[in-house]
Amino acid sequence: MKGTTLTVLVTAALMIAGCSGNPQKNYVKPVKIIFDTDLGPDYDDVGALAFLHAMADSGKAEILATVSSNRNELVAPSIDVINTYFGRPDLQIGAPKGNGASMGAWQHWADSITRKYPHRINSTDEVPDAVEIYRKVLSSQPDKSVTIVTVGFLTNLSNLLKSGPDSTSPLNGSDLVRKKVRRLVSMAGRFPEGKEFNIHIDSAASKHVFENWPGEIIFTGFEIGWEIRTGLRLIASPVENSPVKDVFRISIPLSEEDKYGRMSWDETAVLIAVYGTEGFFETRRGTIIVHPDGSNSWRDDPDGKHLHVVQKMPVPEIARFIEDRMMHLPMAKPSEGGVPEVYLSIKPEVLKDKIAGGWAGKMIGVTYGAPTEFRAQGKPYDDSIKWTPSDIKGSIWQDDLYVQLTFLMSMDRYGVDAPAKKYQEMFAKAGYHLWHANMQARKNYFDSIFPPYSGMPEFNLHADDIDFQIEADYIGFMCPGMPQTAVKLADKTGHIMNYGDGFYGGVFVAALYAAAFFESDISKVVATAMKSLPQESDYYRIIDDVVKLHNHYPDDWRPAWQELESKWGEVDICGAGSPFNIDAKLNGAYIVMGLLYGDGDPLKTLEISTRCGQDSDCNPSNALAVLGVINGFSNLPANMQEGIKAVADSVFIHTDYSFNRAVESSYNYALKFITENGGSVSKRKIRIKKQIPVPPVLEVSFPGLIYKSSISVFDKNGFVLKGKWSNHPVETAGAQNRNFQSVFSGNKGDIAEIRFTGTGISVSGNWVKDGGKADVFLDGKLHRTIDTYYFYSGQQHRNVSLWHATGLNDGEHTVRIIIKGEKRPESEGTNVYLTGATVFTTGT
């Protein structure tokens, strides 16, 4: 079969893909949202609207209309300012025309932004009645498809329910809502009881809506948003000419209670509408009761149509998640008149040859660098590098290949549109070993933490690690000239194990490949791929630094490496306090250094990306894969081609994929995505509708977090142990061992306590087959219950993060770990092993 390794079986592939140009497919179905706000009396509405636009830009939401429940003259113009800023000036805006509250912004931010920024509406009086907008929009949407988010008074919704048939719909308001609305999310009420502004201002409307709404209502109450503070990172950001930043910049200093940021009441409603409650909140089912004085109470009822949320995710972590999305910058919009469609042409055999070159580059590069992996930390690798084509067989056992091939298997078995949880399940249950972010994502699956939460910093201290960067190649290989499709596919698998810069690492390498199919100039490939990154992200900044350093030192990579190391070498949460750095962005920078200084030469590219150090098998693997796509398999050095052919039908461990099958499958999926994007496929030519790069929304895993100190469990001034704790020896060969690796206890009620000063901490220990459970209290409050069992695919992990918390107020904190004496059924014991802690602070 070796002779048929790269035979182009085009006919069969064409039959699979089809030749018609289908409309582009969304792999994440957006939530259709009508946003109803009282914007003016408070300014968290502005943060919520910015959040919503970020969701629309990322394809997670479709904004149908933005209406106001406030009749103040500057409300509609202010909404128009925000909509226009985010490139949606034509969104429909409405407001009450009869009775209704009229309340302005006492901080005068509305005056400021309507003077400074473009908008078409000059007064709220100019816009149609909100009920007219509601009826028009709802009648045009599919049944049970619309989510209404109300973060203000209930005036409009009460009027909607009372409305009669009209020219837009023969249904009355109640029947129209019943037919078209999927869910109502309302920022309203205090729970279990109290008086809250949105209900109180128009209590008659609130009572009418809550008693007569024909579907489910989810409430996020005053007590939820009060604790979640946002805005300080936004106003400290370098972005200029942003009305969102201006509103918070003007308003926060005017109130003492906002010194830690503004309460995020309204943002939580948008979050729930788009992401749901799972992972963020728990819910209580029952009925809200509105009293004559405008207060409310709650009655538990398992059959009730109302739910109110209760905090689950720790406050600092949910605040970071929200503010990331508030800080989203507008996407570049096409100029008026639109962008002309551009089609790229490629022969079928050339496309397949380039895909084969990419997979070959991965296999060659990872085996070239494997003997050097992490042998150079914080310094270049200067020893000799020995490699022969016969070494390529070692790629069969490399996680750079087998993890992403599992995702391909998931696509085959469950389909492209399958939920990310199915992809996580297949890779969690696979028989291979995993490390870092993948390891945590596997454990998260068995702890019932599913995507996207499994990759979030709240549940994964490895969120910025390299994992997705080394396993997103398959996405780029099947998205030639289609970076937007690549980002959509990446959003699903990348958030299984990563977030922020860790996610962007996968986006970036996929974008490199998408560009490399049609561009041979390495500098242009890199520049194009950078457009798929948020410019305000650290990942973008470090790649930009590499490009500038290459321009400054065009002939010598070492001084460029040294300057990069001085600036970025210690930016790693996983390896904090050590020269070890598995952060995606630093290793991504080494990919680009290899590409730019390699001058298109495969061996030179391999050598430089390897000698940069750190994860020096993964980085040359990605770098050579880019060259493989640019040049194609047939133009790789002959000895590399022969080395691949020798193992082309060998199956990667714990998958059903070989090199040959990976090439064929990637090619078939590429044809599928090409046609779905509006391209066409024939036996002689493939036409690809070119996509402009669009970056995903900004995500920041650990804002400003830096290493402060490390504490061993054996330090005298570290942990205080109460109960029957024992020392666990270092597991080395030999009968006698006087060194200890950890302390452990499985006794219910035993306590380990540590006090620290900082803004974050990670408590480390062992995940083992006799691991048990413990409750972790932070400053006297239960933060999370941890389960330290891990024996998946015969693997255990020692000295890993058992629990962490970041985003804390700077000051003294106390962590108390209480052993539960409990375990999951498959565990051999109830023990919890502790090795130490890493303390973080916040810097600039």
Image (cartoon, rainbow, N blue to C red):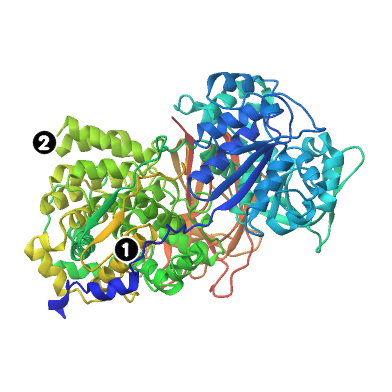
- Image quarter in which the C terminus is found: top left
Q: Nearer the viewer, mark 2 or mark 1?
A: 1
> Looking at the rendering, which quadrant does residue 247 occupy?
top right
Q: Residue furthest right?
A: 292
* Side (left or right) of 835 relative to 684: right
Residue at 14 percent across and 74 percent down: it is: 646
Q: Which residue is mark 2?
A: 555
Q: Nearer the viewer, residue 313 or 717?
A: 313
Q: Nearer the viewer, residue 468 or 259?
A: 468
Q: Nearer the viewer, residue 43 or 20?
A: 20
> Looking at the rendering, which quadrant does residue 808 occupy?
top right
x, y percent for residue 42: 69, 29
x, y percent for residue 199: 81, 39
Residue at 68 percent across and 40 percent down: it is: 36
Tag 2: residue type? Asp
Residue at 70 percent across and 20 percent down: it is: 106
Q: Nearer the viewer, residue 322 or 511?
A: 511
* Side (left or right) of 396 relative to 139: left
Q: Which residue is mark 1?
A: 670
Residue count near mark 2 (Cα–Cα under 10 Å), binned few <14, some 14–19, many ≥20: few
- Look at the image and tell me whether residue 58 can be seen: yes
* Side (left or right) of 81 relative to 796: right
Residue at 30 percent across and 66 percent down: it is: 666
- Image quarter in which the N terminus is found: bottom left
Tag 1: residue type? Ala
> Looking at the rendering, which quadrant does residue 307 occupy?
bottom right
